[in-house]
Image (spheres, rainbow, N blue to C red):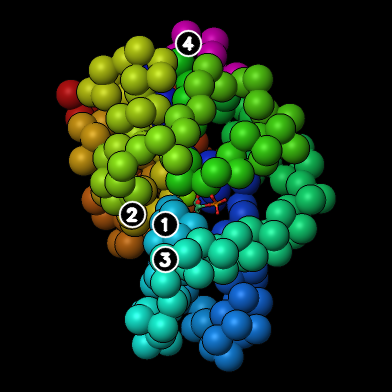
Amino acid sequence: MKGAIFDLDGVITDTAKFHFEAWSQLAKEQFGLILPAEFESELKGISRTDSLVKILEFGGLRDNYTDEEILALADKKNGYYLTAIETLTKDDILPGITRLIAELKEHGIKLSIASASKNAPAILEKLGLLNEFDAIADPSKVANGKPAPDIFLAGAKAVDLDPADCVGVEDAVSGVAAVKAAGMTAVAVGDATELAQADAVVPTTADFSYELFEKTWQENN
Ligand code: BG6
Ligand code: MG
């Protein structure tokens, strides 16, 4: 293993509830829709506009909105989201992540971010982690969102590594699919049944370690 390519939301910090609350507020105000709780996990890893399209399809409203209107509504949601994450600090880094970053660096592993979020640099800054990563792949520069491999391929390329030499770290079904499609080893956090496509799944981020990543990569290669 030469690189670890990280998802952000749900792996480094837990922002899923803020995304879900912002979408719920928008859906209620704009469409009179109440989003079912399952949407919180269904929208994990999915880009901002793809998320809105899913919500509109759920409400049978997709054809009522132009692409331009969709962009404006997605922007409105982002405003609610930005307000919600204003108070993020280093105390919001998920358990074990600061230690994991230090362990990986000690072993000379390159670190990069492959998040669907356009807010990733701002969030990393708030967490005090911006300078810990060698690169942040830009989701606005890739053609296809997760489950397509594009953002993970961009994450490996940004640190000059072959995807096969990298472990991709994820919490979402769409994200694990993207890691595997990129030809990487997948280590995931969450429900082992839901994330069965990953090469290793642990229940919490506190279970992540250099040893786990290296061992999983070895077994996969
Ligand atoms: C992913 C989240 O990391 O980023 C998704 O899991 C979110 O829920 C996506 O929609 C895009 O984020 P943003 O910050 O660009 O709206
Ligand atoms: Mg995630």
At label 4, which amino acid type do we have?
A: His
At label 3, which amino acid type do we have?
A: Asp
At label 2, which amino acid type do we have?
A: Ser
Circle 3 Cα neighbour tier, 10 Å, few/some/many (<14 / 14–19 / ≥20):
few
Ligand 1 neighbours mark 1 (CB distance < 8 Å)? yes
Task: Name the front one of labels 4 and 1.
Answer: 1
Q: Give the main secondary structure of the magenta stretch.
A: helix
Circle 1 residue: 46
Of the image marks 3 and 4, the number of the one nearer the N terminus: 3
Q: Position of residue 196 (x, y in %)?
A: 27, 54
Q: 113 or 47, which lies in front?
A: 47
Residue 213 lies, with reference to residue 34, above or below; the image says above
Q: Which residues are magenta?
A: 102-109
Circle 3 residue: 67
Of the image marks 2 and 3, the number of the one nearer the N terminus: 3
Residue 109 lies, with reference to residue 28, above or below; the image says above
